[in-house]
């Protein structure tokens, strides 16, 4: 059996007729940017997140960057970011000239540990930027209360958590603003780069509408120094089709995650995903840990099971930050995770039989005689 980590043809195949219709609608309209598809998508997505405003932008990285720009964050300012996870979160901070201040994760949830925030705050700290890693929200009640005490802005990196809940509230409505990515492989993916910002802050939303379009909302009236970061009509039209299926697709992931959790409990030295009782994850990735990660990955590859490592190098040890002065040992939890994590196949388009085959393959690695 072959179990690819991801099959990006399957989602489009399931929605083929509706995607074709969306494509024709945009092509025939002769209007490709900042039009009625984007406006409709923004209102539909804001509603699904239960956020007052949604601003479509070109990608998830710029969604985060634009919020920092709109807050006037720049050189000399410090932003608390997770020490583990994807480097894009850090890059958004670096692109506005501010300094990422890494915060170690809770070793059980892999999300930013609110208990460490206080020790990292300085007079220069302006915001906390937690990631909802692998599709499970960070502990936003604790993060918000730390931030409120210190007067910090809270920006969620919601690139991996479309539809996830924290105490029943949706990812994207858990801080002051949230950056979303619709990169094709995310739970809610477009057919090219795309992203969005959600917020309840009307003033912030207005500035963001300028900043994504050269700092201009009324043509040739440029009130801010903006970017060109627009979500195209075509991608907005595709996203409108897919939004109708997001809940269903997330519940299909949930069923497969439960299958993994049942079949992999107690196998070898595996550490399985931990879900606090207040969290409802959407399983963007199903990430296990083992001290024998590389050997397990090779074993699974040989059995036709695709896996990936999210992420093999913590941002502080990446070449991009070579001049920032960090070294191995600075963030031991992030470094240990990078050495041990392995992502198994999960998506709405994997079958129960495929997941069972992956589980059997994992078990055969730890117990070759079974
Ligand atoms: C995908 C991702 C991003 C970046 O999104 P793009 O749309 O690829 O720019 C940022 N943060 C996290 C956690 C991501 O997974």
Image (cartoon, grey):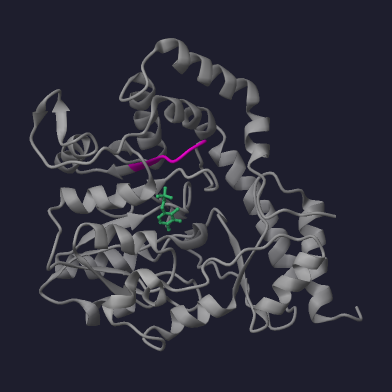
Position of the N terminus by quadrant:
bottom right
Residue 9 in the magenta stretch? The answer is no
Q: For this view, does 229 lie left or right of residue 105? A: left
The residue lying at 24 percent from left, 38 percent from top is: 212
Considering the image in quadrants, where does the C terminus appear? bottom right
User: Magenta includes 192?
Assistant: yes
Q: In the displayed structure, would residue 87 be above or below residue 241? A: below
Q: Position of residue 287 (x, y in %)?
A: 60, 67
Where residue 105 sits, quadrant-wise, is: bottom left
Q: Which residues are magenta?
A: 191-196
**Which residue lies at the image location 52% right of the left edge and 15% below the top edge?**
24
Q: Position of residue 13 (x, y in %)?
A: 68, 31
The answer to whether residue 230 of the structure is visible from this angle is yes
Q: Main secondary structure of the magenta part?
A: loop
Q: Is residue 135 left or right of residue 321?
A: right
The picture places residue 19, in percent across and down from the top left corner, at 57, 24
- Residue lying furthest right in this view? 369
Q: Quadrant of residue 2?
A: bottom right
Residue 304 spot, x, y in % from top left: 80, 60
Pick the front one: 190 or 188: 190
Q: Looking at the picture, tell me which residue is in the foreground, 362 or 329.
A: 329
């Amino acid at each position: 059996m072959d179990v690819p980590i991801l099959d990006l043809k399957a989602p489009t195949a399931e929605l083929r007729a509706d995607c074709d219709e969306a494509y024709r609608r945009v092509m025939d309209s002769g209007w490709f940017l900042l039009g009625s598809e984007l406006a409709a998508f923004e209102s539909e997505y804001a509603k699904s997140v239960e956020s007052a405003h949604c601003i479509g932008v070109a990608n998830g990285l710029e969604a985060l960057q634009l919020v920092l720009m709109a807050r006037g964050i720049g050189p000399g300012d410090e932003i608390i970011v997770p020490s583990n996870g994807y480097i894009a979160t850090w890059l958004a901070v670096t692109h506005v000239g501010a300094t990422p201040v890494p915060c170690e994760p809770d070793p059980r949830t892999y999300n930013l540990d609110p208990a460490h925030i206080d020790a990292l705050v300085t007079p220069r700290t302006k915001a906390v930027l937690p990631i909802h890693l692998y599709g499970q929200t960070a502990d936003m009640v604790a993060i918000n209360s730390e931030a409120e005490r210190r007067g910090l802005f809270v920006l969620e990196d919601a690139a991996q958590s479309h539809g996830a809940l924290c105490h029943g509230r949706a990812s994207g409505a858990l801080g002051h603003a949230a950056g979303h990515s619709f990169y094709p492989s995310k739970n809610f993916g477009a057919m090219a780069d795309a992203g969005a910002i959600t917020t309840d802050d009307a003033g912030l939303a207005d500035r963001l509408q300028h900043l994504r379009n050269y700092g201009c909302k009324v043509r040739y009236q440029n009130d801010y120094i903006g970017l060109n970061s627009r979500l195209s009509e075509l991608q907005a039209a595709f996203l409108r089709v897919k939004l109708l299926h997001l809940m269903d697709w997330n519940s299909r992931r949930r069923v497969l995650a439960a299958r993994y959790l049942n079949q992999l409990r107690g196998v070898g030295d595996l550490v399985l995903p931990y879900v606090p009782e207040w969290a409802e994850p959407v399983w963007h990735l199903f990430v296990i840990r083992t001290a024998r990660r590389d050997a397990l990955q090779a074993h699974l590859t040989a059995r036709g099971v695709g896996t990936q490592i999210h992420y093999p190098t913590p941002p502080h040890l990446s070449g991009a930050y070579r001049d920032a002065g960090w070294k191995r040992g600075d963030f031991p939890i992030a470094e240990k995770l990078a050495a041990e994590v392995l992502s198994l196949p999960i998506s709405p388009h994997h079958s129960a039989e495929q997941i069972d085959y992956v589980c059997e393959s994992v078990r055969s690695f730890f117990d070759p005689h079974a």
